[in-house]
Amino acid sequence: MDIDTDPSPTPTATSTRHKCSACFKQYKKKEHLIEHMKVSCHSAHQPKCGVCQKHCKSFESLREHLTELFGTVIGPLAKGIVQVSLSPEAGTVTLSYIKPYTHNPVQEGIMHGGRREAVALDCEMVGGGSDGSLDICVRVCLIDEDENVIFHSYVEPLIPITDYITEHLRDAMPLKEVQKKILTSLYNGQSIGIVRLNGGNARLLVGHSVNHDLDCLRVYYPDHLIRDTAKYSPLMKTNLVSHSLKYLTNTYLGYEIQTRAHDPYEDCVSAMRLYMRMRAQVHDIRVSRISDRPANSSSNGELSPWDMKGLDKLTPDELFEMSRPGYKCWCLDSITLL
């Protein structure tokens, strides 16, 4: 029997790996990469590493990525600047992963013209009902982008409260009047129909868990005009769970809040500054309605780009260009209204 004693191995075909252009995950089959792109919602609006250009779900996941990349713990820094010492020979590398924000009411006041204005809302809640388990709004504050107070008042509770100094409520305003003043400011002269359709000149409403405040005030405002710092994906935890406003303020603005009694004005200012810092981010936005429109938004009957044929023939970069963000990036609020 002849035995092949040739020690050279039999050549095998090299398997092709399909790599995501955004998060760098690799797949054996092209269809798996396409399915990944459908659900990942990658876009130019996601936080991106300045070293390897990897896209991350949030700024917190970006910090974790930088920690793994450099092998040293990188904590949350309010200025968005990371200084990493690589080695005595290489020196220190300075990275900026969030555009710094410095409050400038004069400059921001000039920029109001031509785009939709924003106001921030916060309420002070107390326990109501027989066991104090119901959240009752007893104080409300509304400010503009320059941190000027638009409306600030105590609110007359509709049911008895159990854990608040009632002497503050002697001059409280009835809830219906509070609702009218808030909606007048938000609608900005627009009809309810226009506000619910496309917003018109109505103002954006900024806050932290602001829908809870609106529920306690018994006020409705369209979701497309709400900017909630508790639900904005780049500001959330890696697992997309909300941070507290106190944490966000310390992490991204660099100062402490809520060290004393709750002050709605203080929380309004923090939420507004967080919003304006995120709005000031500059992204490499492609001139494409597809890439900027949120994945869960209405497309007026248009087919999803992922329903088209021939996706398996597209390159990873072309698939990334088709991908839509899973949220509306606040940088788009800086675009001038037509």
Image (tube, helix red, strand yellow):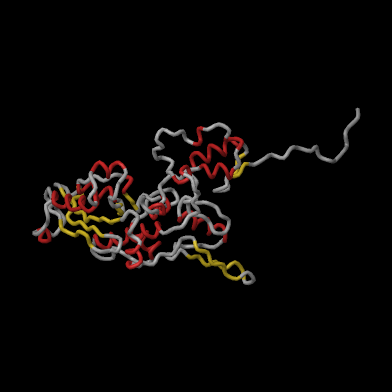
Q: Quadrant of the N terminus?
A: top right
Which residue is outermost to the right?
A: 1
> Which residue is at a point 50% across and 63% down the rendered structure image?
96
Dividing the picture into quadrants, the one containing residue 27 is top right
Q: Residue 12 vs residue 34: left or right?
A: right
User: Closer to the camera, 52 or 5?
Assistant: 52
Q: Is residue 302 above or below residue 159?
A: above
> Which residue is at a point 52% across and 67% down the rendered structure image?
83
Q: Residue 14 vs residue 120: left or right?
A: right
User: Closer to the camera, 246 or 36?
Assistant: 36
Which residue is outermost to the front?
A: 338
Measured as percent of width and height from the top left, residue 242 is found at 37, 51
Q: Residue 97 vs residue 198: left or right?
A: right
Measured as percent of width and height from the top left, residue 308 is found at 52, 33
> Which residue is at a point 24% across and 52% down the rendered structure image?
188
User: Closer to the camera, 259 or 266?
Assistant: 266
Which residue is outermost to the left?
A: 170
Q: Is residue 25 visible?
A: no
Measured as percent of width and height from the top left, residue 93 is found at 56, 67
> Which residue is at a point 81% across and 39% down the rendered structure image?
9
User: Closer to the camera, 216 or 223?
Assistant: 223
Measured as percent of width and height from the top left, residue 333 is found at 38, 53
Q: Is residue 255 above or below residue 227?
A: below
